[in-house]
Image (cartoon, rainbow, N blue to C red):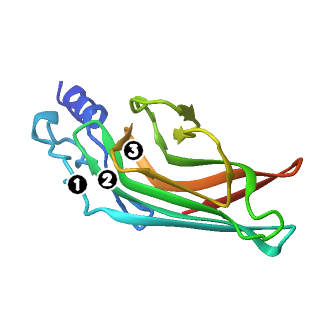
Amino acid sequence: MNRLIRWAAVIATAVALTAFGGQAALAASPAGTPAQAISAVVPAADPVTLHSHGWKSGPAGAHSFEVAGSSQVSTSCGIITCTALYKNSHSDTYWWGANPVNAKQINASLKWWITGVNINFSLPPGAGFSRVTGGVLWKPGAVSNTWHVHLSYSSGVGIKATVIFSVFYSDQADILLGSSWYHVQGNS
């Protein structure tokens, strides 16, 4: 019976994760500790700002297109589930050329994702959200005849997992000049 209790405690042991600078720290109870005595709750970490930046060469030279943004993310773990909560995300996409002054179209997007075990989430309300591997993509729609697009999403995007290994944020855009498409991306 004692052996069965120990195995039950090992199986029921909660694995908690604290994400700090992209590093994972796992904590588990010692073997033989009754499941009721396990306290694996990790309080929410202070938000960390993830920055993204990218350039793409094109008709105006090596830095024809630029994308830059940031998102705040905090992580917390309960007994069974960890959560990465992204807030205050924004991105700016630029076409820096003079001929033409404006791109025909800029289709910008934001992406929040994690690596971990048993990842799950619900899509935020509103248009343009879709599922991608490990997270959420927000593509609100193209803007025509412009040289700059600003995206901002201040509400929370929550992604849950049994264990979170890393958190990521990226912004990207597809830009149409004449009949040619260019892709620029920035990753955290």
Q: Secondary structure at mark 1?
A: loop
Q: Is residue 25 visible?
A: no
Q: Label 2: which residue?
A: 75
Q: Determine whether label 1 and label 3 are within 8 Å by CB.
A: no
Counting labels gives: 3
Q: Mark 2 or mark 1: name the one nearer the start of the chain.
A: 1
Left or right: where 87 falls relative to 97? left
Q: Label 3: which residue?
A: 163
Q: Is residue 71 visible?
A: yes
Q: Position of residue 39 (x, y in %)?
A: 14, 45
Looking at the image, residue 125 lies above or below residue 168: above
Residue 21 or residue 2, whichever sits in front:
21
Identify the amino acid type marked 1: Ala
Identify the amino acid type marked 2: Thr
Q: CA distance from mark 3 to mark 2?
A: 11 Å
Residue 61 falls in image quadrant:
bottom right
Q: Mark 3 or mark 2: name the one nearer the start of the chain.
A: 2
Q: Determine whether label 2 and label 1 are within 8 Å by CB.
A: yes
Q: Label 1: which residue?
A: 44
Q: Position of residue 105 (x, y in %)?
A: 72, 48
Q: Which quadrant does the N terminus fall into?
A: top left
Q: CA distance from mark 2 to mark 1?
A: 5 Å
Left or right: where 84 falls relative to 95? left
Q: Identify the residue shown where x is 44% and y is 52%.
A: 152
Which mark is nearer the camera, 3 or 2? 2
Q: Which quadrant does the C terminus fall into?
A: bottom right
Q: Position of residue 93 (x, y in %)?
A: 61, 60
Q: Identify the residue shown where x is 22% and y is 42%.
A: 78
